[in-house]
Amino acid sequence: MSKITLYRWMSLVGYFALLFLILNWFTWIAPPEKFPRSMVLMILLLPLLIPLRGLLHGKRRTHQWVIFLSLAYFMGGIDVWFNQNGLRAYLGAAMTLFSVVLFVGCSGYGKHMGPPREPRKEKKARLAREAAEADAARRSAS
């Protein structure tokens, strides 16, 4: 298994684990008492749904932007982990763990993926243009 594949799977596992944890946490396991469930789910799940397409298609730039998104969930998980008791503390620890997996996976994928490759036709045209320019410069110099 290559590093790129490993980091891609780490980012997908961290992403979907975080998505399902938040969905289950605020719907069934420990729903909020002071706020409507739908509002809490919209605030926490909508930012996660925005980069879904780019993550599934393996877009390097999307993975790089999800790094910033994972930091918000990391901070939220740390806050719940250390300021709540009982089950909510364990849910906060799980949120922290999944956000770290997401962070490491997206960081590694963004680092090892490299810049996007130039399409073959455009590369051929660019090389032909550079060769013609070099030939013209050589002719004008002599």
Image (spheres, helix red, strand yellow):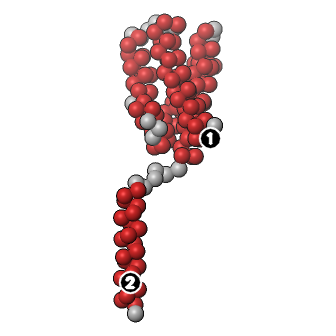
Q: Quadrant of the C terminus?
A: bottom left
Q: Quadrant of the N terminus?
A: top right
The residue pinned by badge 1 equals: 3
Give the mark nearest the N terminus, 2 or 1. 1
Nearer the observer, 48 or 34 = 48
Q: Which residue lies at the image location 62% right of the left edge and 25% below the top edge?
A: 97
Residue 43 spot, x, y in % from top left: 41, 22
Residue 105 spot, x, y in % from top left: 58, 35
Q: Give the SS element for disc 2.
A: helix
Q: Give the SS element for disc 1.
A: helix
Q: Amino acid at mark 2?
A: Ala
Q: Which residue lies at the image location 60% right of the left edge and 19% below the top edge?
A: 94
Residue 137: mark: 2
Residue 74 spot, x, y in % from top left: 56, 28
Relative to 15, residue 61 above or below: below
Q: Seen in the image, is 124 located left or right of residue 7?
A: left
- In 3D space, how far apart are the residues under numbered discs 2 and 1 (Cα atoms)? 44 Å
Residue 29 in sight: yes
Q: Seen in the image, is 9 located left or right of residue 65?
A: right
Label 1 neighbourhood size at 10 Å, few (<14), some (14-19), many (20+)? few
Label 2 neighbourhood size at 10 Å, few (<14), some (14-19), many (20+)? few
Residue 75 in sight: no
Q: Amino acid at mark 1?
A: Lys
Residue 132: mark: none
Nearer the observer, 97 or 75 = 97
Q: Seen in the image, is 88 located left or right of residue 68?
A: right
Q: Which residue lies at the image location 48% right of the left edge and 36% below the top edge?
A: 66
Q: Are marks 2 and 1 in contact (CB under 8 Å)?
A: no
Residue 129 spot, x, y in % from top left: 36, 71
Quadrant position of residue 80: top right
